[in-house]
């Protein structure tokens, strides 16, 4: 209840419980003050708390753990130089407060810097700790000062940490919470954490805890008057919906007020806060306002507050009881961890704030597999829940043009354009709620404030917190007006005063200021078929709306509207924009804007491989034609020579009109491959282009203004731009050195018959089009020299000895004129360019040597006359294969070596073996049966040949002659058959000698006739064997008479049988006939 008390209770009496409570709580921390004060001037350092490793924390086996600890100077003076030590050992040794044995590298010590009184310093030991133990293990860490001070109990701290694997550790990192929310709305939340060595599919829990900060649980508002006057009406008690409950009573006397507060329904042990705020005439009296916290010791508490020295008037006091941190709710949900991750975002349960105010949110993770609780939670963070709406009018200004103020009479007016989209209002949502705000514009006559017809006008915008909105209004009026802009807020509007803005404006008649905005400049180029965008421009304060008409050359209408897309035919055109607006009379002329444009025909072309890309522009139809390229004529191109350049290649092309004979060309752009036009020895960056005026005379002229040529060595490309010309004839000129092609390893080789072969390897770009090949020079009197000092020196000395020209690909040449025995020659091989001019700097001479003149090269036409030693042929028979075998053997002769250098004077020789049945004088027309025969002196060689059929095979009964012919290393041979180089052999039938058992016994005929031969004939004439043999003999004789060389020895057994019968028939005296037959059959 509120009211006035004539005899109020003493303030001291009423405040006893509160004062005692405050006194007791405030003296508790002062209990050690006496000791502390006595020691402030002595050295007193304290180990505050370890930072790393965390107490009882678990870490991965492979992790190097930092060693960090906080220390503080508790003395009253600056102190420095204290030594801090850290020890690490395996096992739990916290009970003994010491490490019996240290981990390798420990203990470590550092010296602390000078610390100011009460300054805390974070000390870190370098290198951290890595135990190297691959098993789960507990370790003890001891931080301590090397020497104790006046408080030894805080000079040392010992605790344990653990190394485990796998370390399934969830470490909270961050969340997506915002700083401001609205009540009653559901919001999604998520938190990010690192996940240690979890297995895929492991389950954990993600939750949050919501608490309200300063949650008001009771409030009363009381007013009372001090001094004369009536008391304000009783405001009554504001009943609370739920405990705790609060009731208040005000009493006053003279210049003081007493406030009695009764709080019931308190929860014992809960922390509460009571606050009071005094106001006079709605002005807060901060001196008599305050708050205090206490912990409820009983369900009911009473407070008495007294305020003195107050001014006369009505004073109101608002009393509230609040809980500093009020738990609201806690939510969690299950999450699935998919293995190791340094950062994973997990969705949390959604959150809804029950009311407005300040709230605290704390995220946390929970897993039975996680040994580290200390890194699972976030720090509580504060968010504001507000449903405030605060719509603020920011500005009212012209929507078009600049802000301009004009003076009319004695008043200032803002100048606005006439017509559509003239006035712009900006407003902003400065509140915390999304708000659908309606903006209203009212226009009043400036003279009598009467409303203007058609107004108010309005627009609605949905605004997010801190977002701005814009509304644009039409002003189809002329004159001076008052404009009021207002925006609607809501029941929770914080500051309605800023929802309204008023200003004075004037609307005048102006011209449109029409112009062609796009195309932006005169002379812009477009292509045939290209869509041309036309955009009309107006003065910012032009009266709207307007009508836009587009014409060509003031006459032909091509489009309507502010923006138009048109296509125009080729040619030069004048585009005109015609504008009319609502303030114009019919007699008023159009406002006109003008733009000159050109519509061109653009073609793209190529002519590979020289021209890779090109384009040409004209206002007529046309086609591109590449006429070709050519080497420059052999005339002096003075324009190129005067600037130190060499003509390289001409390039000719043209544009041909497809309709008519006239072609007006704007430009031709050509991109191409410069390597197709210049030799590889020329640097592309040195190349220039010149117009050819008279190609045959070599007259060139530089490129004109606006024309250009660029050539790039980086990618072998060029770009040429020419203007106005349809027929282009260009000469490319550049820095061209002599073609660097040199005949290396220039040498000679003697050939048979005194011929000389020149051989070399071409070094350099032989495929260079400016390399024309080689010239060969030959002189027999005395050797050439090399090199030559000048072109004239070369011409005077060498040129008259020219022999032949060779292509650039040639790497050898055989002199068709052999050198007779005893005659030697010198050769020069020199490079020539594509025009046949000799390059005396690139060549070579045969027989060149470092000192002295080159050697002469001599021919070799003398054939060797050597003879073999002991050439013989032996006939053998292989009864197994029934084959006769001829084995030829010889002994190599010793060759003359007068200089005893191990090499015969005439060089080594080789032998060629021939076989014939008639010994010729020379083997010129015979084919060898073996070549390349050679051997050391007095060593033996052999050749084996078996009996074979055919024309070239060995045959029984024939005589064969084997001939060895020598030749020297260059192939000289006379082919003469020398007796000592010949071995002959007759092939006799050795079958019966190897098979005597096959010979039949002799048959003695009856001798009834005086002639034994007749008796034998008569006895055998009826014998079938005899008859058969006779017939065979006749046939064989006939065949032998026709082709003896072909059919001899076809059937040895039949022939032997025939011979036996003949011998039997003619008897012993027939020696003469036997000799004839033997000679006939071989």
Image (tube, rainbow, N blue to C red):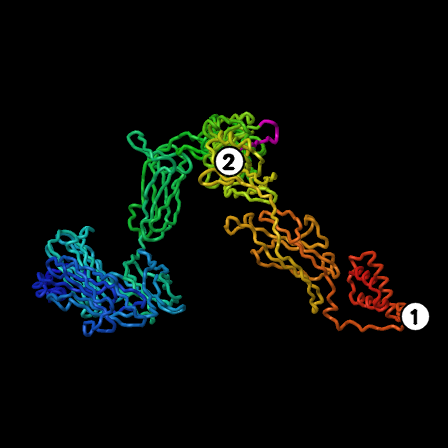
Q: Nearer the viewer, residue 626 or 534?
A: 626
The stretch drawn in magenta includes residue 655 = yes
Q: Secondary structure at mark 2?
A: loop
Image disc number at residue 784: 2
Task: Please tell me the numbered disc located at residue 1009.
Answer: 1
User: Which badge, 2 or 1, is on the more N-terminal residue?
Assistant: 2
Magenta residues, dominant SS class: strand
Residue 405 in the image: x percent, y percent?
Answer: 32, 33
Residue sitting farthest toward the right = 1009
Residue at 25 percent across and 66 percent down: it is: 54
User: Which of labels 2 and 1 is toward the front?
Assistant: 1
Assess disc 2: are there few (<14), some (14-19) or many (≥20) residues with their C-alpha within 10 Å of its C-alpha: many
The answer to whether residue 251 is seen in the rendering is: no
**Residue 605 belongs to the span the image colors magenta:** no
Q: CA distance from mark 2 to mark 1?
A: 100 Å
Q: Secondary structure at mark 1?
A: loop
In the image, residue 571 sits, relative to residue 814, either above or below, namely: above
Magenta segment range? Answer: 648-662
Q: Nearer the viewer, residue 947 or 519?
A: 947
**Whole-percent x, y for residue 992 in the image:** 75, 68
Residue 58 percent coordinates (x, y)? 29, 69
Q: Quadrant of residue 153?
A: bottom left
């Amino acid at each position: 209840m509120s009211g006035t008390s004539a005899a109020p209770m003493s303030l001291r009496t009423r405040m006893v419980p509160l004062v005692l409570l405050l006194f007791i709580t405030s003296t508790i921390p002062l209990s050690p003050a006496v000791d502390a004060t006595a020691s402030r001037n002595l050295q007193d350092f304290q180990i505050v708390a370890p930072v790393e490793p965390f107490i009882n924390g678990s870490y991965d086996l492979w992790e190097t753990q930092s060693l960090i600890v906080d220390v503080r100077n508790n003395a009253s003076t600056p102190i420095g130089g204290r030594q801090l030590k850290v020890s690490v050992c395996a096992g739990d040794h916290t009970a003994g407060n010491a490490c019996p044995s240290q981990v390798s590298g420990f203990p470590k010590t550092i010296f602390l810097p000078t610390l100011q009184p009460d300054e805390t310093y974070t000390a870190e030991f370098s290198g951290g700790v890595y135990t190297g133990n691959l098993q789960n293990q507990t370790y003890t860490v001891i931080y301590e000062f090397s020497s104790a001070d006046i408080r030894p109990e805080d000079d040392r701290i010992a605790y344990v940490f653990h190394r485990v694997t796998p370390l399934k550790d969830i470490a909270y990192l961050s969340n997506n919470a915002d700083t401001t929310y609205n009540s009653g709305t559901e919001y999604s939340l998520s938190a990010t954490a690192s996940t240690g060595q979890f297995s895929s599919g492991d389950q954990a829990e993600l939750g949050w805890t919501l608490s309200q900060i300063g949650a008001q649980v009771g409030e009363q508002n009381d007013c009372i008057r001090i001094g004369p006057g009536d008391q304000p009406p009783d405001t009554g008690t504001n009943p609370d919906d739920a405990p705790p409950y609060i009731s208040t009573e005000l009493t006053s006397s003279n210049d003081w007020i007493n406030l009695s507060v009764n709080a019931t329904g308190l929860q014992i042990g809960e922390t509460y806060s009571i606050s009071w705020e005094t106001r006079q005439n709605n002005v807060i009296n901060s001196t008599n306002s305050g708050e205090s916290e206490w912990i409820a010791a009983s369900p009911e508490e009473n407070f008495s507050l007294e305020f003195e020295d107050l001014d006369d008037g009505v004073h109101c006091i608002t009393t509230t009881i609040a809980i500093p941190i009020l738990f609201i709710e806690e939510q969690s949900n299950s999450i699935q961890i998919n293995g190791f991750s340094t950062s994973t975002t997990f969705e949390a349960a959604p959150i809804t704030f029950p009311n407005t105010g300040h709230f605290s949110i704390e995220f946390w993770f929970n897993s039975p597999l996680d040994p580290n609780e200390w890194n699972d939670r976030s720090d509580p963070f504060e968010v504001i829940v507000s449903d405030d709406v605060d719509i603020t009018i920011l500005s009212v200004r012209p929507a078009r043009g600049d802000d301009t103020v004009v003076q009319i009479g004695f008043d200032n007016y803002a100048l606005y354009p006439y017509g559509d989209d003239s006035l712009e209002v900006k407003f902003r949502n400065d509140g915390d709620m999304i708000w659908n705000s309606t903006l209203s514009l009212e226009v009043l006559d400036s003279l009598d404030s009467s409303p203007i017809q058609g107004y108010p006008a309005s627009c609605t915008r949905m605004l997010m917190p801190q977002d701005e909105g814009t509304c644009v209004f039409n002003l189809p009026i002329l004159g001076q007006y008052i404009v009021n802009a207002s925006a609607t807020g809501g029941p929770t509007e914080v500051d309605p005063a800023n929802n309204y803005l008023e200003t004075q404006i004037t609307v005048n008649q102006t011209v449109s200021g029409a112009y062609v905005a796009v195309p932006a400049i005169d002379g812009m180029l477009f292509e045939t078929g290209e869509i041309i965008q036309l955009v009309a421009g107006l003065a910012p304060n032009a009266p709207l709306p307007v009508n836009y008409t587009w014409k060509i050359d003031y006459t032909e209408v091509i489009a309507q509207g502010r923006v138009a897309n048109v296509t125009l035919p080729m040619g030069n055109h004048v585009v005109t924009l015609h504008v009319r607006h609502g303030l114009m009379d019919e007699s008023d002329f159009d406002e006109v804007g003008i733009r000159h444009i050109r519509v061109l025909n653009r073609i793209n072309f190529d002519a590979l491989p020289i021209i890779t890309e090109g384009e040409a522009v004209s206002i007529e139809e046309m086609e591109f034609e590449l006429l070709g390229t050519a080497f420059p004529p052999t005339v002096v191109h003075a324009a190129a020579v005067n600037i130190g350049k060499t003509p390289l290649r001409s390039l000719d092309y043209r544009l041909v009109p497809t309709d008519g004979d006239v072609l007006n060309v704007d430009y031709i752009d050509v991109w191409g491959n410069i390597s197709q036009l210049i030799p590889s020895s020329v640097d592309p960056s040195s190349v220039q282009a010149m117009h050819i005026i008279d190609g045959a005379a070599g007259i060139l002229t530089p490129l004109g203004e606006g024309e250009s040529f660029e050539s790039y060595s980086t990618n072998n490309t060029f770009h040429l731009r020419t203007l106005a010309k349809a027929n282009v004839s260009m000469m490319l000129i550049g820095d061209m050195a002599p073609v660097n092609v040199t005949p290396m390893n220039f040498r000679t080789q003697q050939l048979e018959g005194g011929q000389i072969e020149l051989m070399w390897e071409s070094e350099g770009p032989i495929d260079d089009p400016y390399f024309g090949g080689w010239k060969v020079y030959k002189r027999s009197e005395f050797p050439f020299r090399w090199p030559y000092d000048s072109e004239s020196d070369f011409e005077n000395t060498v040129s008259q000895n020219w022999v032949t020209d060779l292509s650039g690909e040639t790497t050898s040449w055989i002199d068709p004129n052999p050198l007779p025995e005893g005659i030697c020659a010198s050769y020069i091989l020199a490079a020539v360019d594509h025009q046949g001019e000799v390059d005396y700097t690139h060549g070579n001479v045969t027989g060149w040597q470092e000192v002295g003149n080159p050697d002469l090269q001599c021919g070799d036409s003398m054939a060797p006359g050597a003879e073999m030693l002991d050439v013989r042929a032996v006939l053998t028979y292989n009864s197994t294969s029934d084959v006769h075998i001829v084995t030829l053997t010889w002994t190599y002769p010793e060759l003359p070596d007068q200089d005893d250098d191990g090499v015969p004077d005439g060089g080594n020789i080789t032998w060629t073996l021939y076989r014939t049945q008639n010994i010729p004088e020379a083997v010129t027309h015979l084919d060898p049966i073996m070549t390349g025969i050679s051997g050391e002196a007095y060593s033996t060689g052999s050749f084996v040949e078996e009996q074979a059929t055919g024309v070239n095979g060995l045959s029984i009964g024939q005589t064969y002659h084997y001939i060895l012919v020598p030749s020297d290393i260059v192939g000289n041979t006379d082919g003469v058959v020398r007796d000592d180089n010949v071995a002959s052999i007759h092939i006799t039938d050795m079958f019966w000698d190897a098979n005597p058992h096959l010979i039949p016994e002799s048959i003695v005929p009856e001798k009834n006739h005086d002639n034994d031969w007749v008796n034998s004939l008569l006895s055998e004439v009826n014998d079938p064997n005899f008859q058969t043999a006779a017939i065979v003999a006749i046939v064989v004789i006939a065949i032998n008479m026709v082709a003896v060389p072909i059919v001899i020895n076809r059937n040895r057994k039949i022939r032997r049988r025939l011979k036996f019968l003949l011998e039997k028939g003619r008897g012993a005296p027939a020696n003469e006939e036997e000799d004839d037959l033997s000679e006939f059959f071989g």
